[in-house]
Image (tube, rainbow, N blue to C red):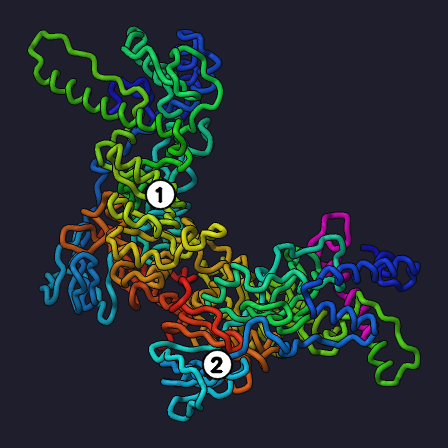
């Protein structure tokens, strides 16, 4: 898209009707979401020009999922992902949160708690999927514009859809549903729980992440800017500069450094949490050179929170540069690289681990890999050399850290959401299976009652 | 095996496949003779060039090899339990001794397997792009396409696959992608063509009337039938090879281990009607052949030799099927497909090997009674039909149900070829991991190991050679660094036909790293 067109779209230098047209379209889109109280609340907030930076969903007054029970879950082995495993553990759950967790000997079960006996089983935190396309309708890409900061995907989520139901049986309780990589900036993704409930009950954070795709899918036809990486880097950079300017104006105004109130531009509103460092970009970036431009443009120039969302092929060769910047790597769905020089397979995760990458996880890019096989992705990474306990963390707390939701999910710790997976053994061993899953303290899958799904 | 058959005259070794001359001769002969030239022109290219079945007995099973003693491992024999701290003796491609405290003959090469696990080599019922270069064109010889230096063999050996059944479709030739008999099954006109090309001097062969494939009513045999012919049966060959990296001798085990049909070609009343006739024709041919042989044996000197019976549309594969030498292999996913195949096999008395079987948990009694073998891919899911969640779709605990009722199951990976695209655990080399998913679905560890070894060996008709560790069987075995179904386990050494064909350290196709314990 030409520079002029970009300006027309943003309303800068464009005629007033054009800008209004965009706004009207945006509102029209919003009004369609009758079922989403969240969206309506957001639109209302926009109209009042007092948009909240990030819509964190509070506990709804009346929860369609019913009251959160008080539970005492006894387990044989407790993998908290926040310390060493505990033999013989107890988890107390109340109000959908973990009230206490630790060795059974140290935790007294208060009166009025329903005791659930899983002393033959393991317990671990619910799995966190950083790269999901199966939590909603399958239309992932709007292909007209190359950058789409006005698009958001949480109006299309389908909570507890059949694929997510199987994913729960694979232990997955939180997913980051993101737009596709058909354009350089696909739009804003959403973090949600996989269990049943209204959208406002299952959404963890919206916007959850910004999806940027740098190469290896968003290429345009020859004859357009963006048919190669030089053009794609240009449109990404230009769009981010525009967003940064917008947020700076508002920041200056709110801090009293600017007298006139900036005009609200709904197209650029979601850049506020991004440039304020409250949410990350999940970047479709893979192969050495592309990751290099991720580091330079998104981190060094724009100073944004970045998550390397594929990091495959030979990206691990850049590990030193990634480490210098403390950038998380959530690799996948490709788990290995065939190295033609030595004729040998190399495990992507093992290579990153060997090079000291700190926050390291794995994803499925579902449906590329079925969502229920997130743990099996870790299995294969261990088969190719990743350390097993890091692999367990790599599907729980590490993606939670990268997505900046580790205060809510990813480990079994007091005060966190009671997203608990009960299983017959280590989740890394495909011979074991999930027996029961709790999300926000409610049992959403129980093989004692439900037919096994995975 | 091609007595009386017109195709016998084609020497497949010397004539190019689908020789133009052959096609023309056939087209001319029949076309002019019958005045059905349009029909023939359409049909002729599909009918020539069945490659003669390779007689595996003529190929030496394995070259001579020195005596090898594998000492100290825990041997999972599959058929005779686990023998701890055992010695296995290999010679000339065979296992010549197995047990505790066997004396190791002087001069034997000793392989220390202390603390290791030894299992039979795994048998994959699906194999593609591994050990066979390209797609052998119709009419060419499979032996000429074997590639014992294919690097994919090492990837497969590294996870334990030592025998594979490759699905071969024709490539390039005039028959299209599938090497095929490509006959419109049992269509009367086709039989007439076949008969006439063989026996043009004998037009009256006693069946003046056939059923119309459109309406099922009697039709004149020379009535041109143009619309809605039955689904052609396009068979694939299921060639069994050893993954004997570096060794051509003994690589080819069996040229065709199944009678393969596409699911569609046996569905629907018309196709099934034609299939019944085809089976009947094969049995009748065998009966006539037996009578003929009896007559020939009883011939006195000077008596005229009778004409051998004509095969018509009866193919070698069909003969092997009705004789019980091979199973009919086809994909049956839904309950109705499974029931249909089981019912046909029962009625027509042949044995089955069913792929997929995702709704098999709904057909437990039928499958159990039928003796059908099954090939399961536990991770392959099929969504239930809306409103029939408990009566359709896949069910993860099917292996548990199958094992409980004694339904034999082999395991197949999600894809039959080696993939280096980076998506892990979804190709041929995930075969043992797929077996781990059988355990997840409730199968016992021993049944899951059988699904990798003896069950596929039985389905291939090769249980006398592979699939378990017993004295007298082929020396195809693995030295593993852990339990066979553990996701961390790799093959350290693989023997095929008594030869050491893979060593993890020397063939670093898989990552090599110190295993954290």
Residue A222 makes an appearance in the image: yes
* Residue labelled with disc 2: A81
Instruction: Find residue B241 and report its image quarter.
Output: top left
Badge number at residue A337:
none
Q: CA distance from mark 1 to mark 2?
A: 46 Å
Q: Is residue B281 above or below residue A60?
A: above
Q: What residue is rendered at 52% in x and 87% in y? A: A414
Q: Position of residue B476 (x, y in %)?
A: 24, 54
Callouts 1 and 2 on one subunit: no
Left or right: B66, with B332 as reference point? left
Quadrant placement of the C terminus of chain A:
bottom left
Please report the bounds of the magenta region as a residue range.
A218-247
Secondary structure category for the residue under label 1? helix
Magenta includes B503?
no
Residue B265: % across, % down: 40, 32
Dot 2, crowdedness within 10 Å: few (<14), some or many (≥20)? Answer: many
* Residue toward you, A212 or B448: B448
Kindly identify which chain the residue marked by label 2 belongs to: A
What secondary structure is the stretch in magenta mostly built from? helix
Q: Chain of mark 1?
A: B
Nearer the observer, A70 or A389: A70
What residue is at 42 percent from the left and 46 percent from the top? B129
Q: Is residue B60 above or below residue A35?
A: above
Residue B338 tag number:
1
State the SS at label 2: loop
Q: Is residue A219 magenta?
A: yes
Residue ID at (21%, 58%): B78
Quadrant in the rendering for residue B71: bottom left
């Amino acid at each position: 898209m030409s520079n002029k067109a970009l300006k027309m779209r943003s309303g800068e230098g464009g005629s007033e009707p054009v800008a209004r047209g965009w706004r009207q379209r945006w509102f029209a889109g919003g009004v369609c979401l009758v079922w989403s109280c969240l969206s309506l609340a957001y639109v209302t907030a926009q109209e009042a020009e007092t948009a909240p930076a990030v819509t964190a969903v509070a506990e709804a007054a009346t929860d369609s999922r019913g009251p959160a029970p008080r539970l005492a879950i006894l387990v044989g082995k407790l993998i908290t992902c926040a310390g060493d495993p505990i033999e013989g553990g107890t988890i107390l759950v109340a109000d959908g949160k973990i009230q206490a967790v630790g060795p059974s000997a140290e935790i007294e079960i208060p009166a009025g708690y329903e005791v659930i006996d899983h002393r033959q089983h393991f317990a671990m935190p619910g799995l966190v999927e950083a790269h999901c396309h199966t939590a909603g309708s399958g239309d992932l890409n709007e292909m007209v514009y190359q950058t789409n900061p006005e698009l958001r995907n949480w109006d299309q989520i389908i909570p507890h859809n059949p694929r997510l139901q199987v994913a729960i049986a694979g232990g997955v309780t939180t997913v980051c549903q993101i737009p596709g990589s058909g354009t350089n900036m696909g739009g804003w993704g959403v973090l949600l729980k996989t269990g049943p409930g209204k959208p406002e009950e299952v959404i963890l954070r919206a916007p959850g992440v910004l999806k940027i795709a740098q190469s290896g899918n968003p290429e345009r036809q020859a004859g357009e800017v963006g048919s190669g990486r030089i053009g794609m880097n240009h449109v990404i950079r230009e769009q981010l500069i525009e967003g940064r300017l917008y947020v700076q104006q508002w920041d200056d105004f709110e801090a009293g450094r600017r007298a006139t109130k900036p005009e609200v531009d709904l197209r650029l509103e979601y850049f506020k949490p991004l440039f304020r460092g409250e949410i990350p970009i999940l970047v479709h970036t893979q192969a050495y050179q592309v990751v290099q431009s991720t580091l330079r443009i998104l981190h060094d120039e724009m100073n944004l929170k970045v998550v390397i969302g594929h990091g495959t092929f030979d990206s691990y060769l850049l590990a030193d540069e990634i480490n210098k910047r403390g950038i998380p790597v959530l690799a996948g769905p490709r788990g290995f690289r065939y190295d033609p020089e030595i004729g040998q397979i190399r495990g992507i995760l093992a290579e990153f681990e060997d090079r000291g990458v700190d926050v390291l996880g794995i994803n499925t890019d579902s449906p590329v890999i079925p969502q229920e096989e997130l743990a099996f992705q870790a299995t294969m990474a261990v088969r190719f050399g990743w350390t097993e306990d890091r692999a367990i963390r790599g599907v729980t707390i590490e993606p939670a850290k990268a997505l900046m939701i580790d205060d809510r999910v990813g480990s079994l710790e007091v005060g966190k959401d009671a997203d608990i997976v009960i299983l017959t053994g280590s989740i890394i061993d495909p011979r074991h299976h999930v027996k029961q899953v709790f999300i926000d303290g409610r049992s959403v899958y129980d093989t004692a009652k439900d037919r096994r799904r995975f | 095996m091609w007595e009386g058959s017109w195709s016998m005259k084609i020497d497949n070794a010397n004539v190019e496949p689908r020789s133009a001359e052959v096609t023309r001769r056939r087209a001319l002969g029949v076309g002019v003779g019958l005045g059905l030239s349009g029909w023939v022109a359409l049909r002729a290219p599909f009918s020539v060039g069945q490659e003669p079945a390779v007689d595996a007995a003529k190929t030496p099973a394995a070259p001579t090899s020195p005596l090898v003693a594998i000492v100290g491992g825990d041997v999972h024999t599959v058929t005779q339990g686990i023998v701890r701290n055992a010695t296995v003796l290999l010679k000339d491609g065979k296992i010549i001794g197995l047990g505790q405290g066997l004396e190791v003959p002087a001069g034997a090469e000793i392989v220390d397997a202390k603390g290791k696990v030894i299992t039979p080599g795994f048998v994959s019922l699906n194999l593609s792009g591994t050990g066979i270069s390209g797609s052998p064109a119709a009419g060419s010889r499979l032996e000429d396409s074997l590639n014992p230096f294919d690097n994919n063999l090492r990837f497969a050996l590294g996870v334990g696959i030592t025998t594979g059944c490759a699905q071969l479709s024709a490539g390039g030739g005039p028959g299209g992608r599938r090497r095929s008999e490509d006959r419109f099954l049992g269509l009367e006109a086709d039989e007439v063509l076949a008969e006439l090309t063989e026996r043009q001097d004998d037009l009256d062969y006693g069946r003046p009337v056939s059923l119309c494939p459109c309406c099922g009513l009697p039709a004149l045999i020379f009535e041109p039938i143009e619309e809605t012919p039955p689904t052609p049966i396009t068979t694939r060959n299921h060639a069994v090879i050893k993954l004997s990296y570096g060794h051509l001798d003994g690589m080819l085990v069996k040229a065709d281990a199944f009678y393969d049909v596409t699911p569609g070609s046996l569905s629907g009343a018309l196709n099934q009607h034609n299939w019944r006739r085809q089976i009947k024709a094969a049995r009748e041919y065998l009966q006539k052949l037996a009578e003929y042989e009896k007559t020939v044996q009883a011939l006195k000197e000077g008596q005229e030799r009778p004409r051998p019976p004509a095969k018509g549309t009866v193919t070698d594969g069909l003969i092997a099927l009705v004789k019980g030498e091979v199973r009919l292999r086809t994909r049956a996913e839904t309950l109705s497909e499974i029931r249909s195949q089981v019912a046909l096999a029962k009625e027509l008395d042949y044995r089955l090997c069913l792929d997929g079987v995702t709704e098999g948990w709904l057909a437990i009694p039928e499958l159990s009674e039928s003796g059908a073998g099954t090939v399961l891919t536990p991770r392959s899911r099929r969504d239930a039909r809306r409103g029939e969640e408990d009566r359709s779709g896949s069910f993860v605990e099917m292996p548990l149900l199958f094992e409980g009722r004694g339904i034999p199951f082999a395991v197949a990976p999600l894809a039959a070829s080696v993939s280096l695209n980076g998506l892990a655990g979804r190709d041929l080399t995930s075969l043992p991991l797929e077996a781990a998913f059988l355990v997840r679905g409730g199968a016992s560890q021993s049944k899951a190991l059988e699904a990798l070894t003896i069950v596929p060996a039985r389905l291939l008709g090769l249980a006398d050679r592979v699939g378990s560790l017993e004295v007298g069987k082929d020396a195809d075995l693995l030295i593993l660094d852990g339990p066979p179904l553990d996701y961390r386990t790799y093959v350290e050494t693989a023997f095929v036909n008594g030869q050491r064909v893979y060593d993890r350290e020397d063939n670093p196709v898989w990552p090599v790293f110190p295993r954290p314990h």
